[in-house]
Each structure stands twice: as structure tokens, then as C-alpha cells.
Image (cartoon, rainbow, N blue to C red):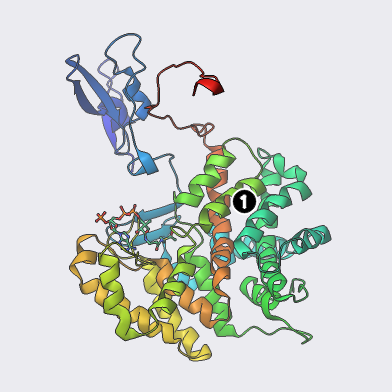
């Protein structure tokens, strides 16, 4: 929030309202003990500019001070208006609206509009948005041929990453990244086509024919149809499962500057097109420390096998032998609000599908961990992935498709982050610095002398 102060011009007596930071900037005073020089570094929005440190030098030929921050533990790489998280209080808001309200009242497509465009759509805006996305769900027939080249047991994330990247070759107009209309078209294409690719990955695995999109169905309903339709003329999604999937998509739509969003921004900062940029982001999501965790949670629960084995497993976690997958978060150090909503959604899903035996193990694991000093001290709580896998499994999704579901939802967030980066005049090609600690200059040694 910009704080203004009233300034009076002594010459004219006129009063002016001016942002406080211009008149009385807050400064961070730094004294360099090497030179005893003092520097006043302006503070804006609780941050200092890393470039302002460059003036701190011991001599004229000194490069100047840098910060060292592996894994960006304390570095803001952008200013953003998309998603707000307060990790200590367990708050998540898209464009200011609490995730709890969106999960209860909105739909994924409406949330995607909000995340990308900044405001909730009017009825006609939402109709137009939905129409365009619905009419961009089909894939070029050659995409199918491309996908048929994968081995039958190819991991769906490998297929998804490659196929999203390949879309770049089908849509060369997507390179026109500074044209607003082109960005809009690529947005429709990405949100529309990613579920189709995801479903084809699944059908490819099973050797089943691909199912074309059904424009009469909702976004999640159409996805379920493309996944599960067999010989029936019209697939009718179960409304409870359709709604649960929509909620899961909403919860995963964006999460500010996480690993994959950072890749999306970073790749996009070289002005690569959105398809290849998103392929990179999806690749980052694939890793087990990020979106791949939901898959790992399920494997872990299956490995534990029964409730009575939980204490033994916790002992192995505390001994540093294994990680408790689905626990811990870089930002949330209280609880992950998405995990709470997912747990409630799970109850409704299990009424339709029957209760998963893995849920009992998960509940036991959570109960034991939350009372244990090891987890309390490190502020480790269940994250979004702890329960999502159990719901996905109950809905019939194979374990290695879980991250693909995450990618479908995150498409909206990646596009929003990419667009915000492109339109931000302060952004440039992402290019971090390094602290070089390797050899000094030395001569090449011929092979016979090594
Ligand atoms: N199980 C056991 N110990 C853990 C776990 C865990 N899941 N997570 C963190 N810790 C421990 C670490 O060993 C470390 O202990 P130490 O202080 O004794 O060395 C301490 O807690 C701090 O952990 P860091 O790894 O420093 O935390 P960081 O913020 O770097 O990592 C991360 C966050 C990657 C999510 C981590 O908690 C983790 O690996 N969790 C399991 C994987 C997972 O569920 N990922 C999904 C995240 S949500 C998402 O991406 C959608």
C-alpha cells in the first residue's frame, strides 16, 4: 500500500499529496568494515535493490557487492499482482480473493480468467472465454501421430512435456509474443489443448483409441470423457467427481514464484514462445520435490502398507533415511490451506467411489507427524500433494498421471506469470550471477603429459 504525505510549497502555500517514499525514503544504512564507508540503500516494499549494492566497492576495479542466494531463499525476482501467499498464516489468494471462496463458489475456467486477466469476468466475458477455450480443445491430427511414437509405457509427464513443446511447431504465430491478440489466442489454445494431450497420454498407455473433445461438457467433464469414454455414445460424468476435479484444478491454478513458474518466466524472458516456455515449466513440475510429490505420496503410502507400520516409517524419516512425501513447504510453515480444502473434498469423493484404504494410512501418518517434535520443530505440515493423490486414485487416475493433472490446472498460472513478466518494463532476460570458485587461469596440458 502506497502511503502519501502532504507537502506544502512555502513559495505558493499550495499543498501536494506525494508518496512518502519519494519525500522521506526509508533507507538501509550499510557500513563497509573494509573501507569504513557508509551507504544509504533505499528501501521500497520492504526490499532493497540488489543492483544498489553494486556501488559498494573496496577499489575502483572491484566489481562491486553482490548477494549470494542459492535457490532464491530470500530474493524477490519480480513484482507481481497475481497470487498472494502468507506462509505463516496459511493464506492463499488469487488476485486478492481467498482460495476458500474460489473453491466453494467458482469454477476452474472462471478462476483461470481471474488469474490471467486480473478481475472476475462478467457473464458475457465468461461465456466468450469458455466458448473460445472449448473451441480450441482439438489437436492437429499430426499431434496424434507424434504421440504414437512414444513407447507404450512412456511416463505421461515425459509425453506431456514433449507434446506441449511440439505445439510450438504447429503454431509458429505464437512467436508474436508482444501482440495482445496473439497472446490471447495462445492462451485459448494452451488451456484448451493441455487436457486433450493429457487424456491422449493416458489412452496411449492403455492402447485405447483417442477420444475427441465433447463441446457439450464442462471443462472437467470433457476431460473425464476424453479419459474414460468407451463405447457409449455420450459420456456422462458423475457430477460429484466432475465438481471435485474442478475444485482440484482451482486449488492448483497458481502458486506465485514456485519452481515451475520461475522456469516459465525465465524461459519466456528470452522471448521464446509460450509453448516451449510452458514445456520447460511442466518439466520443472515433473520433479518429485515439486508437482511430482503427489505421485511419490501414493507410492509411499503403498509402501507403508498398513496403519500399524506408520511409527516404523516415521522413525526412518527422523533418521534421515527417507522423506515424508507430501509434507513440508518452502513457504507454508503453518498449514497449506489447499490441503485443508482437499481433505474436505476427499470425503465427498469417497461417498461415490468408496473409501480408499490409503486414506487411513495417510490420516494416521498425519496424526503421528503433527504430534512429533521432529515435525513440529521444522514446521512440517501436509502440503497440497498429501491428499490429492488419494482422491485422484479413487477417481481412477493412474499414479503417474497425477502430475499431469497438476499441469492441466497450473496452465492458467504459468500463462499469467509469463504475461506479467513480458509486460513488466523492469524485466529483462533472466540471467543470474555466480560466485566463481574454480581454478585461476592455467595452461592446457597435452594428453601425453597428463
Ligand atoms: N520429510 C522429512 N523431513 C523434511 C521434509 C520431509 N518431507 N521436508 C523438510 N524436511 C526437513 C529437512 O530435512 C530439514 O531438516 P534439517 O533442518 O534437520 O536439515 C528441514 O526439514 C527443512 O527442510 P528444507 O529441505 O530446508 O526445506 P525447503 O524449504 O528447502 O524444502 C520441500 C521444501 C522441497 C517442499 C521439502 O519440504 C520436501 O522435500 N518435501 C517433500 C516433497 C514434497 O512434498 N514436495 C511438494 C511441495 S508442494 C508443491 O510443490 C506443489
Q: Secondary structure at mark 1?
A: helix
287 over 175 or under it: above or below: below
Count of picture labels:
1
Residue 438, position as x, y percentages in the image = 40, 26
Direction from residue 139 to residue 35 in the image, left or right: left
* Residue 104 in sight in this render: no
Q: Position of residue 275 (x, y in %)?
A: 66, 49
- Nearest the eye: 47 or 406: 406
Along the viewing direction, whichever of 182 and 445 lies nearer the viewer: 445
Q: Position of residue 126 (x, y in %)?
A: 62, 63
**Residue 289: which quarter of the image?**
bottom left
Residue in front for this viewpoint, 224 or 105 = 224
Judged from this view, the residue extending furthest toward the right is 141
* Quadrant of the image occupied by residue 55: top left
Task: Please name the residue that numbered disc 1 is placed on.
Answer: 279
Q: Is residue 302 left or right of residue 418?
A: left
Q: Tell me if residue 349 comes above or below residue 449 in the rendering.
A: below
> Residue 445 at what x, y percent from top left?
51, 19
Q: Quadrant of ligand 1?
A: bottom left
Q: Residue at x 44, y 51 (%)?
A: 258
Question: How many neighbours does mark 1 have within 10 angstroms: few (below 14), some (14-19), or many (20 or more)?
Answer: many
Which quadrant holds the N terminus? top left
* Rendered position, 432 above or below 85: above
- Point 53% across, 58% down: residue: 286
Q: Residue furthest front?
A: 448
**Residue 25 visible in rendering:** yes
Residue shown at 32% from the left, 81% from the top: 309
Q: Residue furthest top?
A: 60
Amino acid at each position: 500500500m502506497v502511503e502519501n504525505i502532504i507537502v506544502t510549497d512555502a513559495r505558493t502555500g499550495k499543498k501536494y499529496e506525494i508518496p512518502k517514499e519519494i519525500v522521506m525514503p526509508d533507507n538501509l544504512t550499510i557500513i563497509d568494515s573494509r573501507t569504513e564507508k557508509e551507504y544509504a540503500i533505499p528501501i521500497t516494499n520492504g526490499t532493497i535493490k540488489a543492483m544498489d549494492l553494486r556501488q559498494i566497492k573496496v577499489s575502483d576495479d572491484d566489481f562491486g557487492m553482490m548477494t549470494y542466494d542459492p535457490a532464491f531463499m530470500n530474493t524477490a525476482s519480480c513484482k507481481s499482482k497475481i497470487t498472494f501467499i502468507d506462509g505463516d498464516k496459511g493464506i492463499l489468494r488469487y488476485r486478492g480473493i481467498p482460495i476458500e471462496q474460489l473453491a466453494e463458489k467458482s469454477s476452474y475456467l472462471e478462476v483461470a480468467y481471474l488469474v490471467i486477466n486480473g478481475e472476475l469476468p462478467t457473464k458475457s466475458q465468461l461465456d466468450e472465454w469458455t466458448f473460445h477455450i472449448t473451441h480450441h480443445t482439438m489437436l492437429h491430427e499430426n499431434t496424434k501421430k507424434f504421440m504414437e511414437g512414444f513407447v507404450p509405457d512412456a511416463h505421461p509427464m515425459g509425453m506431456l512435456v514433449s507434446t506441449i513443446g511440439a505445439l510450438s511447431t504447429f503454431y509458429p504465430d505464437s512467436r508474436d509474443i508482444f501482440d495482445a491478440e496473439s497472446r490471447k489466442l495462445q492462451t485459448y489454445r494452451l488451456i484448451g489443448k493441455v487436457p486433450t494431450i493429457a487424456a491422449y497420454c493416458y489412452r496411449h498407455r492403455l492402447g485405447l483409441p483417442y477420444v475427441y473433445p465433447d463441446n457439450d461438457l464442462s471443462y472437467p467433464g470433457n476431460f473425464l470423457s476424453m479419459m474414460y469414454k468407451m463405447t457409449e455414445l455420450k459420456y456422462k460424468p458423475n457430477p460429484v467427481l466432475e465438481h471435485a476435479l474442478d475444485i482440484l484444478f482451482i486449488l492448483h491454478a497458481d502458486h506465485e514464484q514456485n519452481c515451475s513458474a520461475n522456469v516459465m518466466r525465465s524461459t519466456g524472458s528470452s522471448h521464446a514462445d509460450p509453448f516451449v516456455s510452458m514445456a520447460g515449466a511442466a518439466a520443472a513440475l515433473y520433479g518429485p520435490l515439486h508437482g511430482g510429490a503427489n505421485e511419490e505420496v501414493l507410492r509411499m503410502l503403498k509402501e507403508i502398507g498398513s496403519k500399524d507400520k506408520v511409527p516404523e516409517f516415521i522413525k526412518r524419516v527422523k533418521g534421515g533415511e527417507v522423506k515424508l512425501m507430501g509434507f513440508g513447504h518452502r513457504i507454508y510453515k503453518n498449514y497449506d490451506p489447499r490441503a485443508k480444502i482437499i481433505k474436505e473434498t476427499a470425503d465427498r469423493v469417497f461417498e461415490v467411489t468408496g473409501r480408499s484404504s490409503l486414506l487411513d494410512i495417510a490420516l494416521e501418518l498425519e496424526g503421528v507427524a503433527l504430534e512429533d517434535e521432529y515435525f513440529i520443530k521444522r514446521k512440517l505440515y501436509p502440503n497440497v500433494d498429501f491428499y490429492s493423490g488419494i482422491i485422484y486414485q479413487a477417481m481412477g487416475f493412474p499414479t503417474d498421471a497425477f502430475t499431469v493433472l497438476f499441469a492441466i490446472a497450473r496452465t492458467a498460472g504459468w500463462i499469467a506469470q509469463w504475461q506479467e513478466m513480458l509486460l513488466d518494463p523492469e524485466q529483462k532476460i533472466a540471467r543470474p550471477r555466480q560466485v566463481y570458485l574454480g581454478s585461476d587461469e592455467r595452461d592446457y596440458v597435452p594428453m601425453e603429459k597428463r
